[in-house]
Image (cartoon, grey):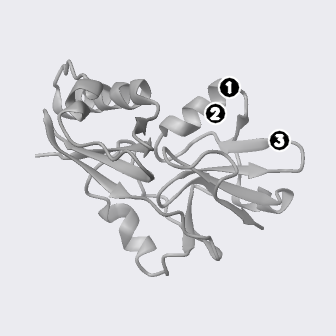
Amino acid sequence: MCQLLESIKCQDGVLYNLAAHQNRMRTSMHKLLGVEAKLDLKRAIKKVSVPRKGLYKCRIIYGSDIDRIEFVAYDRTEIMDVVFVHDNALSYSHKLLDRACIEKHSKAFSHDTEVIFIKNDRLTDASYSNIALYNGAEWHTPTYPLLKGTMRKRLLEKGKIKRKDIMYNDIKAYSHISFINALNELEERVFKL
């Protein structure tokens, strides 16, 4: 059976962007499992002990129902290097627990190296996040990410980032890459190109 994963930011007992995570869970359950879920994430999470101090990743593992909720302390590692990996067959449109298609590439590098995937000569995502690139005036995020992340969606809605079809050869037009995901806002994890 297909197992899915949702990662939610929990800081000092506060859970962030629950509605977007719940919506993505419902969409994935419908598309992959044919289940019309009536999930209430807030209620489900209240049944477990939520850490009151510090930054945690709330991991929700689910299939046709929630299987497990766990909290893992989160530490932002400094990015020391970025590598670009070309893989035209790579597909990760749903946040699956099985990340073998991504890990086959990222396991070759150290934990402080971010892998950015190039598909059909276009930038897509990094191994654990969406990306946004800064050109000196504005932040652009690839039009065709592997996974449409909740933070990416929120930043697009707020106008903080803009969609752009970024080709591999376009990278030289940018000075910085920000790695964005549920636990990392724009400019929290940045690498200077």
Dot 3 amino acid type: Glu
Q: Is residue 110 above or below residue 146?
A: below
How far across and down, in percent of the image, does residue 81 sit? 64, 76
Dot 2 amino acid type: Leu
Q: Secondary structure at mark 2?
A: helix
- Please tell me how crowded label 3 is: few (under 14), some (14-19), or many (20+) other residues with Cα within 10 Å: few
Label pair 3/2, CB-CB below 8 angstroms = no
Q: Residue furthest right?
A: 136
Residue drawn at the location 73% of the way across and 51% of the way down: 133
- Please tell me how crowded label 1 is: few (under 14), some (14-19), or many (20+) other residues with Cα within 10 Å: few
> Which quadrant would the C terminus be assigned to in this image?
bottom right
Q: CA distance from mark 1 to mark 2?
A: 5 Å
Q: Which residue is mark 1?
A: 158
How far across and down, in percent of the image, does residue 183 sit? 50, 48
Q: Which mark is residue 138?
A: 3
Q: Is residue 34 left or right of residue 115?
A: left
- Please tell me how crowded label 2 is: few (under 14), some (14-19), or many (20+) other residues with Cα within 10 Å: some
How far across and down, in percent of the image, does residue 177 sit? 71, 57
Label pair 1/2, CB-CB below 8 angstroms = yes
Q: Is residue 168 left or right of residue 98?
A: right
How far across and down, in percent of the image, does residue 131 sit? 62, 51
Q: Is residue 42 above or below residue 67?
A: above
Label pair 1/3, CB-CB below 8 angstroms = no
Q: Tell me which numbered mark, 3 or 2, is placed earlier along the sequence.
A: 3
Disc 1 versus disc 3: nearer the observer: 1
Q: Tell me which numbered mark, 1 or 3, is placed earlier along the sequence.
A: 3
Q: Which mark is residue 155?
A: 2
Q: CA distance from mark 1 to mark 3?
A: 13 Å
Q: Based on the displayed image, in which of its 4 quarters is residue 40 positioned?
A: top left
Dot 1 amino acid type: Lys
Q: Is residue 170 left or right of residue 115?
A: right
